[in-house]
Image: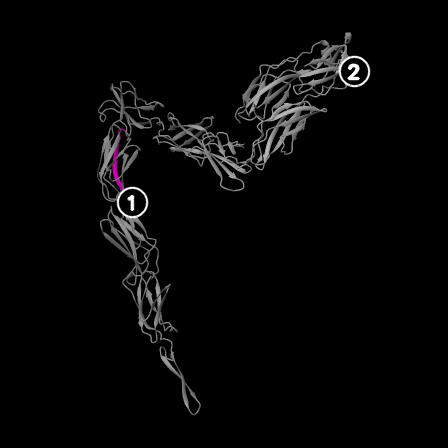
Amino acid sequence: MHCGQLYNLTVTALDGQCDNVRANLNLQSVPCRPTNVRTSMPPCPFTQASVAWEHARGAQTYAVQAGWGVSCNATTATSCPLGDLLCGHTYNVSVVAADGVCSSPESAGAQLSTAPCPPQDVSLSMECEAGILTVSWAPDPDADAFVATLVSDTSARHTCVSAGTACSVAGLPCGQRYTVSVVAARGGCESEPSAPLEISSAPCVPRNPEGRLDCVTNSAWVSWDNTGGALRYTALTEALTGDHNSSCTALPSAGSCGIPHLKCGTEYVFRVVGANDVCMGGYSNNFTLETAPCSLENITAVHECGSNRILVSWENTPGSPQYVVTAEGPDQWPISCNSTFSSCELQGAACGTQYTVMVSASSDKCSSLRSPPMDVTTAPCVPRSVVVGRSCEEDGAVVSWSPSPMVTSFLLTATGASGDVRTCETADANCTLARLPCGEAYTVNITASDGNCTSEPSVDVFFQTMPCQPTQLSVEYQCEANESVVSWTPSEGSLQYHLYASPELGGAPMVCSTPHTSCRMALECGSVYNLSVVASDGLCNSSFSAPLRFGAAPCAPDSVRVRVRLIDGMQLAMATWPAVACPAPVKYLVSLEGRIQDDPRARVDLWSYPTDRLYYEFPVPCSTVFNLTVRSVNGGGVSVAGPHFHGLTAPCPPADVRYSIELFDRITVVWDESVFATGYTVYSSSGAICNTSTVFCQFLEADPDSLWVTASNAVGESEPSSNITGPVFVRGRRDLRSNEVAAGSLSALSTPGSVRLEARPAASLYVAWTAVQDATLYTVIVKQPSAARPALVTTVDTEFTTVDGLEPLTRYCVTLAAKNALGQSPYSTPQCLATGAPE
């Protein structure tokens, strides 16, 4: 079948006699392949092209493919544009015809080549003396040649062409600024120009150089006429005799510069040269100057640290009766002094200034005798404008101040109220102090040093470090008001506190902000909260305090009463208390702790079960000192200990009772001391026959076998002693007390006097007193007034002791009594003192 033809198909049924046409069909053949494909392009450089072809029979649409992702479509037209062409590429263009069902074979291809890409990696190098500029670039295989164009700031234009990767332009005039770009060429088509680069040729030689001599400072001022192309000018000088050269540099706008400190009596040659970022130009014409003659020698200039004086001395010159000393400093009025001797003192020197000092013998400085210039630097100025900024993140402060001239280092000293000293040595005008202790006031000053002298300290500046973390959270729940009072220790440096109470079972926390160290909160009785406090001084916040888990427990009973009874030989301590008001049901816990016979190793520690009664009873041994406390409890927790009752039981019966019989049937009964007893009674069958506070008794006409002894105190009387032994011989060697009794040497001990208290480190108290005659031991009782905690009791055999384990910054009261084997003195009057701060 021919391409692009419409065929009519007819189907005829034949039976040999009649022909019958029953069906026909139109059939379109495949479109013909497009022919004469050709391309056209606009002038270079370009990014589009046009493709055209001859009409193909049977075609309804055309599709053009050029590769590299470039294509276009046409319907009935026989051309279409190709856009977004890339530079430096060759495209193979072909056309396919389609009729909506079939596509023709691809047409014969046509080639399309785009313009080269702009040259890459263009660089410039200048041969300054020869005036030759070389332009180089990266190789490009798509380009046949490259053209570099130079355009000066006076619009002068230079070009060079190369088929390689570099070309040069020679003979460039001085003092010109050039803009350079490169294009690539291929087949008569040029690329876009490369990114422009700028470069300068060598500066032109400066003209008309001249100079003048400043005889006061022996300096030369050099001036010249500017020429093109220089960014800076340098004047250079060299001594014609000797080895000395110097220079100065200035911007073109200055037109001159000074060369200081030339040697006296020396001829110098001067010249000027210009330079830019790339090249140095040629040297100007030379000129010479001769400096002032040297006459005065051995000049010394010394600045006295801490003063505004400069002491200048020299060697006298014959025939010079008058000397003038002059000191000049930058931006300072000259200072001077006159002298007929070989020294002079300059007054009023400014701090932190370098002065040039010169001594002359007359007012005509250029023609008279004068000294070479000498530099002297005064002491650094006191740092000023000291500013302290807080650094919350670093727990410190940032200190800054105004820079001072002629300073090599600064020393910052920060002294805290507690004696903490921080220093910072720096060459900058600022310093950061980190990790400072919280809540402390610091004094800051700065001194400046130049290596020889140190300035006076700056004016003191004060600042406060960030507040300390609040500590020792405590809660008192007030059942009557359904409120809790949360308190904490003051935080140094704090102006405001924020208390957060977060319910343990979830929910929004309650917040209380206050300038005080306590806060009232309506905490729900029976709920448990996590409490934490943060301190603020308005700028920085402390870290959160250690969380306190608190249940809104009921209050403890406000009072406790205890009665000790002796029933059937057993002592019972019955406690009673008033009921606690709280909406939730409340039970009570009763605790009793004590020491039996005042022995720290024999302790009583009893607890009740939770009870809803308002009384409880404990059996307690004789001669026992105890503290009894009542707490309330419900779902919110256990209350703090309420007011405790400090008491003791009746004493135990005296032990080791024995008697001796002397002349005239006089009976002496002796026994061991009963702890906490204040008196003793000796009974016979007829009743009490002796009451005493000592541990012996003497009487007549008694049956020793019918005697018994009891001990008593304010609580009650002990059980009677039993098993009295005797008689005891008064001259037995090993019974010293019997000898003492027989000798009548027993007497009551006196109360210790001159009690002295001292607060010691680590929250301890040192206690000392005068010795008591016949005393062998001393009982020391230390108690915190109106506190629920039990007293501390200790026994020592010296006239001093140190009591440890106390709370810091807490007031304690101390009382003591003397003891020996036969009795105990009354207790001394309490002496009170507060402990010190923790270490």
Within the magenta stretch, is there residue 271?
yes
Is 79 left or right of 702, judged from the image as shown? left
Q: Nearer the viewer, residue 63 or 498?
A: 498
Up-down: is 507 above or below 118? above
Label 2: element kind:
helix
Within the magenta stretch, is there residue 446?
no
Q: Which residues are magenta?
A: 264-280
Residue shown at 44% from the left, 90% from the top: 15
Name the residue tied to disc 1.
Answer: 279
Res. 829 image quadrant:
top right
Up-down: is 252 above or below 750? below
Q: Residue furthest bottom?
A: 17
Name the residue tied to disc 2.
Answer: 705
Query: Which amino acid type corresponds to the residue marked 2 in the rendered image?
Result: Asp
Q: Answer whether residue 816 is visible to the viewer in this image.
A: yes
Q: Nearer the viewer, residue 144 or 355?
A: 355
Is 748 left or right of 39, judged from the image as shown? right
Up-down: is 197 above or below 539? below
Query: Which amino acid type corresponds to the residue marked 1 in the rendered image?
Result: Cys
What is the C-alpha distance between the residues marked 1 and 2? 134 Å
Q: Position of residue 188 (x, y in %)?
A: 28, 62
Of discs 1 and 2, which sits in the foreground?
2
Is 120 left or right of 693, judged from the image as shown? left
* Mark 1 touches mark 2? (CB < 8 Å): no
Give the color scheme: rainbow, by chain, secondary structure or one colour: one colour
Residue shown at 59% from the left, 32% from the top: 632
Residue shown at 23% from the left, 24% from the top: 368
Label 1: element kind:
loop
Label 1: few (<14), some (14–19) or many (≥20) C-alpha neighbours in 10 Å: some
Q: Position of residue 74 (x, y in %)?
A: 33, 69
Q: Nearer the viewer, residue 749 or 569?
A: 569
The quarter of the picture where the N terminus appears is bottom left
